[in-house]
Amino acid sequence: MASILAAREGGEVLFFSMATSFTAAALGAEGVGKDVRLTIGNGYARGHARLALDLVRSTPALQRIFAARVG
């Protein structure tokens, strides 16, 4: 519900957690009168692995976090 309230009118809220109650989200948006697009992702996005690796490779702060956790 917080993501719906934070979205701008006509905006979009992306849900990727299968723990989300999509019925409650839709009814909640209607209940507060918020006109937003509710999009349910299935967890797959083409090119996601390359994007994630490129992000880590180009971001020193992320490299430090991973190095600290992995060894």
Image: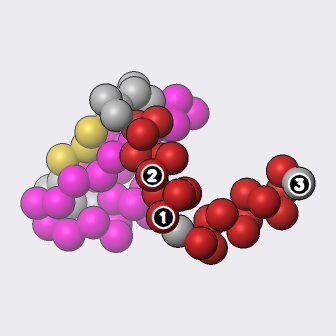
Query: Could you tell me if the residues under marks 1 and 3 are in contact, i.e. CB atoms within 8 Å?
Result: no
In reply to whether residue 16 is colored magenta, the answer given is yes
Q: Is residue 24 above or below residue 13?
A: above
Instruction: Give the alpha-carbon distance from disc 3 to disc 2, as whole Å.
Output: 20 Å
> Foreground: 28 or 45?
45
Give the number of the disc on residue 58.
1
Q: Is residue 36 above or below residue 25?
A: below
Left or right of 16 in this view: 14:
left
- Residue 13's spot in the image, x, y percent? 30, 52
Check contact, mark 1 vs mark 2: CB within 8 A.
yes
The residue at 73%/57% (across/down) is 66
Q: In the image, what residue type sits under mark 2?
A: Asp
Residue visible at 45% across and 52% down in the picture: 54
Locate residue 5, reporting x and y percent.
34, 66
Q: Which mark is residue 54?
A: 2
- Quadrant position of the C terminus in the picture: bottom right
> Dot 3: what SS?
loop
Within 10 Å of the Cα at label 1, are there few (<14), some (14-19), or many (20+) other Cα atoms? few
Q: Position of residue 14 (x, y in %)?
A: 33, 46
Indicate which disc, 1 or 3, sits on the residue closer to the N terminus: 1
Residue type highlighted by circle 1: Ser
Please report whichever mark, 3 or 2, sits nearer to the chain's N-terminal start. 2
Please state the extent of the stretch shown in magenta in the rendering: 1-29
Q: Secondary structure at mark 2?
A: helix
Magenta run includes residue 46? no
Answer left or right for 10 relative to 24. Answer: left
Q: Which residue is mark 3?
A: 71
Pointer 2 local density, CA inside 10 Å: few below 14, some 14–19, many at least 20: few
Taking 28 as reference, is 21 above or below it? above
Q: Quadrant of residue 32?
A: bottom left
